[in-house]
Image (spheres, helix red, strand yellow):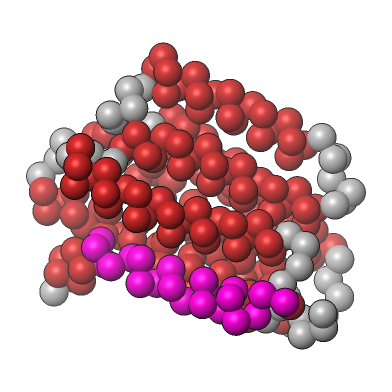
Amino acid sequence: MIQDFLTWMLYHTIYFLIFPIGIALYRYRFIKKERTYVIAFLGLGLLTELTATWFSEVFGTNLPILHLYTVLEFNLIALFYFSFFGYFYSRRLVPSLMVFFTGFAVLNSLFIQKITEFNTYSRGLEALLVIIFSLLCFYKLLIELSSKNPTQQPIFWINTGFLLYFAGNLVLFILSNVILKENKAFNYMSWGLHSCLIALLYILIGIGLWNSPHQK
């Protein structure tokens, strides 16, 4: 039963992406500042899903797309946090990590891990950096708490989604190439759990975008 559900999730994640994109389109005029990078993140996710499906059908693998997606994904998420942090932390922190990560990911894809295999080093580093950003974000929210109910703030939901997704998938990202060699059932369950976490991410982002202030 659980295996069937995880297998279903593996092939239907894109339907959960429709939820936050629909909310973003409906409430676009109320979405400002750092949340515009989240919309770009969702657009990138949709484009990647479609492109990866085509790549897989034509070339038999979509892993080269993952190498490019990893760089673009991290930089969009980093820009989201850079915009939200403002001057609370050093303004050099996020841009420095963006340059470092991009350089590392490119070198990894060119010289260390082939583009036809999972870029586990880059994905693992990305997860660690986003987890750090998420914790820094929660600290800033705590210090600058302007409401007794933090769930009223869009950033709370979006940041929670990023933290749960990347923390939950950290081990999977690091061991992707190992898991790929395991039996088919274990492989499907592992990536099915990944699909559940990304669906949760999309749902939380949707809630965050819905809670965007109604003032233009």
Q: Which residue is drawn at 77% across and 81% down?
A: 213
Viewer can see residue 168 = no
Q: Residue lying furthest right in this view?
A: 87
Q: In which quarter of the image is residue 112?
A: top left
Relative side of 177 to 79, left or right: left
Please state the horizontal and vertical placement of residue 25, each as a whole percent of the image: 58, 76
**Relative to 96, is 38 above or below?**
below
Question: Which quadrant is the N terminus positioned in?
Answer: bottom left
Relative side of 86 to 16, left or right: right
- Most foreground residue, 63 or 96: 63
Please state the horizontal and vertical placement of residue 30, each as a whole percent of the image: 74, 77
Magenta run includes residue 22: yes
Q: Residue lying furthest top in this view?
A: 111
Q: Is the magenta stretch mostly helix, strand or loop?
A: helix
Viewer can see residue 33 = yes
Please state the horizontal and vertical placement of residue 40, each as a whole percent of the image: 59, 57
Please state the horizontal and vertical placement of residue 70, each as a whole percent of the image: 48, 40
- Most foreground residue, 56 or 135: 56
Q: Residue at x 16, y 36 (%)?
A: 181
Relative side of 24 to 49, left or right: right
Q: Which residue is drawn at 46% across and 76% down?
A: 19
- Most foreground residue, 13 or 53: 53
Relative side of 22 to 87, left or right: left
**Relative to 109, is 34 above or below?**
below
- Part of the protein shown in magenta: 9-29
Q: Number of numbered discs present?
A: 0
Q: Which residue is drawn at 32% across and 22% down?
A: 114
Question: Which quadrant is the C terminus positioned in?
Answer: bottom right
